[in-house]
Amino acid sequence: MTREIVNPLNKPTPVLSPAVKIDNLVYTAGQVGVNPETGELAGAGIQEQTKQVMENIKFLLEAAGSSMEKIIKCLVFITDMKNFQAMNEVYKSYFENDPPARSCVEVTALANPELIVEIEAIAIV
């Protein structure tokens, strides 16, 4: 078994790894609607944050030698199920064919009160 930390921006991450590659699988940490290069929130709305989340996942997967098409499972955490439909519109635009398995759960809060969606992914390489 080979284990590799995927940290394409080489930013210090003392409590988690952005992604971990084990053999032919990549596991991303939960991604939120913050631009990893600037540290800025993508916006207050669910669609802006979901788009940034998906772009963050795409960035990590490509750095690990994978892609969005190779995602096999996602887990979505959302702070208000009233935003499910709007989140889903953005989410599904990243999976034109054969979307991955997915779970979606409503949570009371995320790590920062401004965050309203977090998604983690598992992909093959």
Image (cartoon, rainbow, N blue to C red):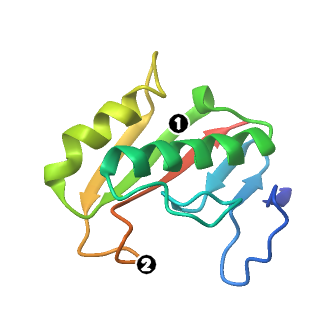
Whole-percent x, y for residue 84 in the image: 22, 45
Badge 2 amino acid: Ala
Q: How many marks?
A: 2
- The first of marks 2 and 1 along the sequence is 1
- Nearer-the-camera pick, 73 or 43: 43
Q: Is residue 57 left or right of residue 62?
A: left
Whole-percent x, y for residue 99 in the image: 43, 26
Badge 1 amino acid: Ile
Seen at 57% across and 64% down, the residue is 40
Dividing the picture into quadrants, the one containing residue 112 is bottom left
Which residue is identified by label 1?
72
Whole-percent x, y for residue 72 in the image: 52, 36
From this view, report whether residue 32 is shown above or below residue 54. below
Disc 2, SS: loop
Which residue is identified by label 2?
111
- Nearer-the-camera pick, 29 or 50: 50
Whole-percent x, y for residue 97 in the image: 46, 15
Q: Considering the image in quadrants, where does the C terminus appear?
A: top right
From this view, report whether residue 17 is shown above or below residue 52. below
Do tag 2 and tag 1 residues touch (Cβ < 8 Å)?
no
> Separation of disc 2 and disc 1 at Cα?
25 Å
Dividing the picture into quadrants, the one containing residue 37 is bottom right
